[in-house]
Amino acid sequence: MLAQTLSTDPSSETPFSSMAIAQDEADACRVPKPPADLAATAYLRNGYRAILRILIAEEALASESCTCLLDQFTWDQALGALPRFQTSDNPRLPFKVLDLYAQADALEAQVVEACAE
């Protein structure tokens, strides 16, 4: 009964685990953290995550889709798109992650704006 003692309301019979906040629908469509075996460093994995965000947002804009397209994309597609986003021949720093983040954020904002209309 330890879970019940952790409740925010001590007089409540509700177990603590049932008080968890449900995942927001927008979070359900958020690109997850890449698997560790995708790339050797977090820098590269973060870059591939941004590339996948860009690919998904571009597809949403092109298809005028306001539904979650995450399940239609794979990490292999992000890896395959590297040449398009590559800014350096250095294998450890083939792209600028902050630039990719900015591009992904801008495209996602366009999707949100288009879907709000």
Image: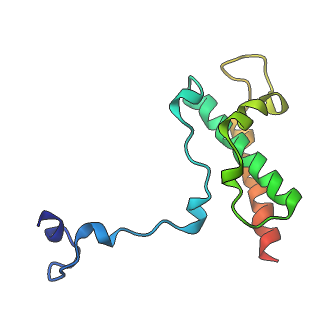
Q: Does residue 89 appear to the left or right of 101 in the view shown? A: right
User: Residue 14 in the image: x percent, y percent?
Assistant: 23, 77
Q: Residue furthest bottom?
A: 11
Q: Which residue lies furthest to the left in this view?
A: 1
Q: Residue furthest right?
A: 62
Q: Does residue 39 appear to the left or right of 10 in the view shown? A: right
Write down the quadrant of residue 17 in the picture: bottom left
User: Residue 38 in the image: x percent, y percent?
Assistant: 59, 29
Image point (75%, 51%), residue name: 56
User: Residue 79 in the image: x percent, y percent?
Assistant: 72, 31
The quadrant in which the C terminus is found is bottom right
Q: How many marks?
A: 0
Please tell me whether residue 6 is drawn above or below residue 88 in the rendered image.
below
Colour scheme shown: rainbow
Please tell me whether residue 98 is drawn above or below residue 71 in the rendered image.
above
Q: Does residue 34 appear to the left or right of 74 in the view shown? A: left
Write down the quadrant of residue 66 in the picture: bottom right
Q: Does residue 53 appear to the left or right of 33 in the view shown? A: right
Please tell me whether residue 98 is drawn above or below residue 109 in the rendered image.
above
Image point (11%, 67%), residue name: 1
User: Residue 37 in the image: x percent, y percent?
Assistant: 54, 27
Image point (60%, 65%), residue name: 26
Q: Which residue lies furthest to the front in this view?
A: 72
Image point (23%, 74%), residue name: 8
